[in-house]
Image (cartoon, helix red, strand yellow):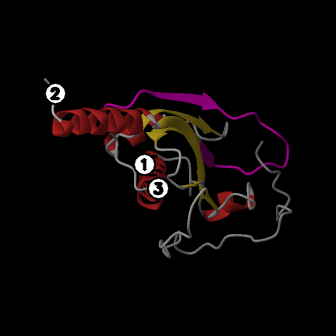
C-alpha cells in the first residue's frame, strides 16, 4: 500500500520529467567578419564568434544540436566548420555552404545558424560582431525572451550600428 509520501514522490518525479521534456529546439544566429582569406584569420574569427555565442547564451557544446555555417564566396582558404571543430565543437554536426553573392553585400563574412536545445524560458541572444553587426542591427545584442545581458564585452575595435538601416552600403541578411 502506497503511503502519502510515496504518492508525493511519484508526483514530484512526474513533474520533474515534464519540466525536463519542456526543453525545445531553438535557433541562434550569428555572424562575424574576417580580416582576410587566410586560415589564421578564419580560425580566429570563428573562435571569437563561438566563444561569444556560448558566453552570451550560457551554452556548452552539449546544448548544441547542430550548426550551419555560410561563408561569402571570397572565403576559400578553409571550411568554417573545421575551425568550429578546432574551437571545441568536435562532436557537433556541422555543415558549411557558400553565401549568395549579392552585389554590395558585406565581404569576408561568416554567418552561422546554431540549433540548440534550451528551456523555452531561457533568453537567447543573437551575436553579430564587427562589421557583421550592420547585417542585423535589429537583432545584434538584443535578448529574446529574457533579461538584459551582463556581457559588456564587445568585439575589439568595432562597434554595433544602432541604426535600423545598414551602413556602408551593406545589405541586411534575411
Which quadrant would the N terminus be assigned to in this image? top left
Q: CA distance from mark 1 to mark 3?
A: 21 Å
Residue position marked by numbered label 2 in the rendering = 2
Q: Is residue 117 above or below residue 131?
A: above
Relative placement, left or right, of 138 versus 7 is right
- Secondary structure beneath dot 2 equals loop
Quarter-of-image position of residue 147 = bottom right
Q: Residue at x 34, y 42 (%)?
A: 61
Magenta range: 90-111
**Marks 3,2: beta carbons within 8 A:** no
Q: Give the number of the disc on residue 43.
A: 1
> Mark 1 or 2 closer to N-term?
2
Magenta stretch contains residue 106: yes
Name the residue rendered at 45%, 57% in the picture.
48
- Of 129 and 25, which appears nearest the observer? 25
Q: Residues within 10 Å of mark 2 (few under 14, many from 20)?
A: few
The quarter holding residue 15 reads: top left
The residue pinned by badge 3 equals: 57
Say above or below: 142 vs 69.
Answer: below
C-alpha separation, residue under disc 1 versus residue under disc 2: 59 Å
Q: Are marks 1 and 2 in contact (CB under 8 Å)?
A: no
Secondary structure beneath label 3: helix
> Is residue 77 in view?
no
Mark nearest the camera among 1 and 3 is 3
Amino acid at each position: 500500500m502506497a503511503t502519502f509520501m510515496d504518492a508525493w514522490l511519484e508526483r514530484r518525479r512526474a513533474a520533474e520529467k515534464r519540466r525536463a521534456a519542456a526543453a525545445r529546439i531553438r535557433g541562434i544566429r550569428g555572424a562575424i567578419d574576417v580580416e582576410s582569406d587566410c586560415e589564421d584569420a578564419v580560425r580566429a574569427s570563428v573562435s571569437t564568434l563561438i566563444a561569444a555565442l556560448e558566453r552570451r547564451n550560457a551554452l556548452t557544446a552539449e546544448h548544441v544540436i547542430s550548426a550551419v555555417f555560410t561563408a561569402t564566396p571570397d572565403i576559400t582558404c578553409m571550411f568554417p566548420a573545421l575551425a568550429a571543430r578546432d574551437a571545441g565543437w568536435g562532436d557537433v554536426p556541422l555543415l558549411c555552404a557558400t553565401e549568395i553573392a549579392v552585389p554590395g553585400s558585406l565581404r569576408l563574412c561568416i554567418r552561422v545558424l546554431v540549433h540548440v536545445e534550451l528551456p523555452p524560458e531561457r533568453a537567447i541572444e543573437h551575436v553579430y560582431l564587427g562589421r557583421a553587426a550592420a547585417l542585423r542591427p535589429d537583432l545584434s545584442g538584443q535578448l529574446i525572451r529574457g533579461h538584459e545581458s551582463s556581457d559588456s564585452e564587445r568585439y575589439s575595435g568595432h562597434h554595433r550600428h544602432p541604426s535600423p538601416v545598414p551602413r556602408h552600403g551593406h545589405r541586411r541578411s534575411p
